[in-house]
Image (cartoon, rainbow, N blue to C red):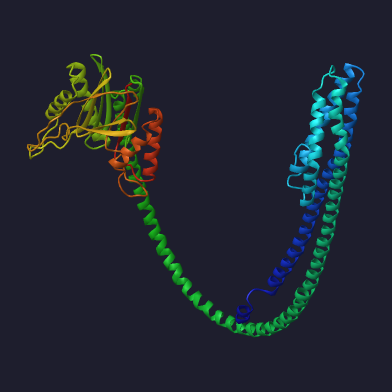
Amino acid sequence: MQQTTTNEGKSPAYRITRIYVLALLLIGLLTVSSQLLVRYVLKNQMADSRVINIAGRQRMLSQKLTKTALLISIATDETEFAKRQKELTDLLKLWGDSHEGLQKGSETLQLPANYNSEVVKELFVLITPHYEAMQGAGYELENFKWQTPKEVFKSSLATMIANEPNFLRIMNEITFQYDKEAGQKIELLKSIELVLMLITLVVLALEALLIFRPAINKVDVYFKQVQASNAELLVINHNLNETQEELKSYIEELKSTEEEIRQNAEELAAINENLIEQKQLIEQQKEIISQRSKNITDSIKAAKRIQDAILIDQSSVISHFKGAFILNKPKDIVSGDFYWFTEQQGKKIVALGDCTGHGVSGALMTMVGASILNEVVNENHITQPDQILLAMDNKLKKILQPNANGVISDGMDLSILVVENQEVHFAAASNKLFLYRNNEIQEIKGGTSPLGSFSFYTKKDYQTHTISILPNDKLYIFSDGLRDQFGQKEGKKYGSKRFKELLGKVGKLPLFMQREEIEREWLQWKGEAHQTDDVLLIGLQVV
């Protein structure tokens, strides 16, 4: 049976059905083609009728033009003269539009374009001199006045009367040619319909010969195969009976093992009870851990509220500049990055810090940094960026404890911007400033040593850079979180080069739109990857 199925492939019903469907599709295609052809010719017939109708009307209009011209020349009063001239104007417009539409086509008159045969085109060439002569004479009559002497009318009227018979004669030939060509199209349609009908009859005959006759032969062959299969089934049934006896002996063996399985089940039940007790103990420990985790999280959230209370609200910073944005994305609940702002002595001072670590340890450093900034700037009135950094460094080294080797490893990177009129003074500890000007990003580097961090082999030096601000300049200070973010797809850091290219691309946008574009780019790069570090970026426009 298996060998037969393999040799025969797909069932005969499938093959016959496929051939039958193909035949029906062919018949349907021929039928649809015939209908489409009929519709196409009928559509052309409508166009033919319209063309013949307009061509016939042209003959009538030419006669009416001549008649109206005569009536103008014999008008008895000015009112009748003006009325006949108005009729002549309308007739010339309709006559001219129809004449042009018959040659080039017209949507208004429902005349198709490129319709004329070469014979018709030649006739239109012959009729053109008479048409132009009559049209010119009509325009002259149209422009005459009532006071114009009647003798002046005679030349134009004579031209129109002289050309009208030739125009009528050639227009008759054009109309009869249109009618002749329409009849030829109908005869062609009859021939095509006859061919399609003959093809359909041939397909039906082939369907009867190649589908139904082979189908009957196949049914007979497969009926004989079914009879042979029945004989094979009888043999198989006998073998099944023998197998049934063997199964009975197997059942007896299974019954003997049932007792062993029952004993094993009792042992498993005892083990299960022990596992349940262990599970309950684990759940109790899990609940204790969960409660402790909740307490820790609540404490961190409380620290977040304290940190937010110490840091200045974003809107308070943004409102002091022509344009500004702050992009702040903590890695954890609390952040190791912070920003700070104040006004002293007519100067706007903005600071951005990146503290050692992140989370709770970093957040503690941010509060220390903000507190020292308040003391150095607001209380001691130090407003020179490099002096602010040196003062903060000294205070941090007093607060932070060195290790056994006399080294302070904790500290922070800090950028200071002091805006005074249209000048910006910048200094930084282990950070830099990006300036967007004329569609390019310029980089201003700060000192290389972070604040607080101390080693006998490191001499700290901070320098103030003064920048004269031009209209549409944008300033950017930032932590290293965005540049150090690993991408989900790429598996590498975003990097300083790509970061500068991003700022250069969005630099011409308003700052509030820049924030959206930068955040979208960062999220797309990060994808589902874990956030590497706290992210903080400040953009400012002074003028």
Q: Nearer the viewer, residue 363 or 458?
A: 458
Q: Is residue 484 visible?
A: no
Q: Is residue 179 left or right of residue 432?
A: right
Q: Position of residue 485 (x, y in %)?
A: 31, 42
Looking at the rendering, in which quadrant would you find the N terminus? bottom right
Q: How many marks?
A: 0
Looking at the rendering, in which quadrant would you find the C terminus? top left
Q: Which residue occupies 69% across, 74% down?
A: 12
Q: Position of residue 87 (x, y in %)?
A: 85, 26
- Quadrant of the rendered image containing residue 462: top left
Q: Which residue occupies 75% across, 39% down?
A: 106
Q: Which residue occupies 69% across, 72% down?
A: 15
Q: Position of residue 539 (x, y in %)?
A: 32, 28
Q: Is residue 321 left or right of residue 17?
A: left
User: Where 297 sits versus 260, above or below?
Assistant: above
User: Where 4 sits versus 35, above or below?
Assistant: below
Q: Nearer the viewer, residue 318 or 507?
A: 507
Q: Position of residue 20 (x, y in %)?
A: 74, 69
- Quadrant of the rendered image containing residue 37: bottom right
- Quadrant of the rendered image containing residue 458: top left
User: Where 333 sits versus 190, above or below?
Assistant: above
Q: Is residue 214 visible?
A: yes
Q: Which residue occupies 82% across, 44% down?
A: 51
